[in-house]
Image (cartoon, rainbow, N blue to C red):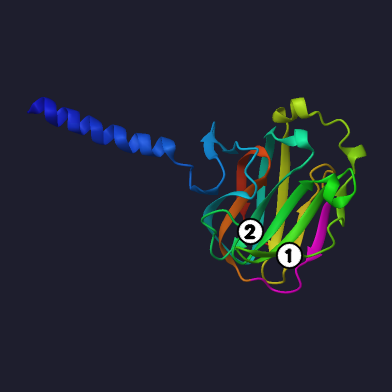
Amino acid sequence: MKRLIVLLCLLFLIVPAFLFSQSMDGWTAAYGDWKMVGGRLVQSSTKAGMAQAFMRLPQSGVMQYEFDVKYIDGGQDMFGAFGFHVGIDSAARGKSWGNGKSFLLWLTFDPKAYGGSGVYGQAYYSEAHSAMAMVHRATAYELPMNRLKDINLNRMATYALPVKARVNYNTGEVKVWDPVIPNYYYRFSLGGPMRGGNYISVRTNSLAASFGNFKISRPSSF
């Protein structure tokens, strides 16, 4: 009997530890092959379009979002992208084009679609899981290839691309820092105040990548 009690106690100790090891530190996979690896959130499928994972995070006022992205695989076909949604009212729980009412920052390399050889930064306003539109012309914000000429796909896994953005939900203004030029940022408006959100999400398209070093803060000013 004592042995049974000891075994049951060990089981109850092991099971929570196992469940904890399988968690994603607050992230939930909506679509794609997501898992935590070495403290980083990894999406490992190069086939999954519209891959997405979300986390609950109340947002209002002025919010600043910072993290970094590491390339894993999928760039060989010269088509791939990643981004993140902020201010999501209700997160999509499966494959989706948009993500509730939210704002998406997107970095894409797609010469076939845009007729250029650069990487484009884009901003979208999502109205629903299936409705999303760009808030500017598609090629407005380009990172020219001559600034990226030294990037080697075979060594990309060692490079962490920094992402930093600040959103003023009271006015709809946004700042996005250039990942290549130090202290340089792009500034634009979504046209008016935005409702605060309950979730954030990261996503990839035909790209395996990892996300880490998340830092969400509330600056005293925009």
Q: Which residue, given by chain and number where applicable, does mark 2 sit on?
A: 86
Say if residue 222 shows up in the picture.
no
For label 2, the SS is strand
Please name the amino acid that badge 1 sits on: Ala
Q: Residue at x 73, y 61 (%)?
A: 124
Q: Which mark, residue 133? A: 1
Q: Residue furthest bottom?
A: 192
Q: Is residue 43 left or right of residue 7?
A: right
Say if residue 169 shows up in the picture.
yes
Q: Quadrant of residue 127?
A: bottom right
What stretch of residues is rendered in magenta? Answer: 184-194
Q: Nearer the viewer, residue 175 or 40?
A: 40
Q: Residue at x 63, y 48 (%)?
A: 203
| 113 inside magenta stretch | no
Vertical side of 27 occupied by 158: above or below: above
Residue 91: percent from left, percent from top? 54, 60
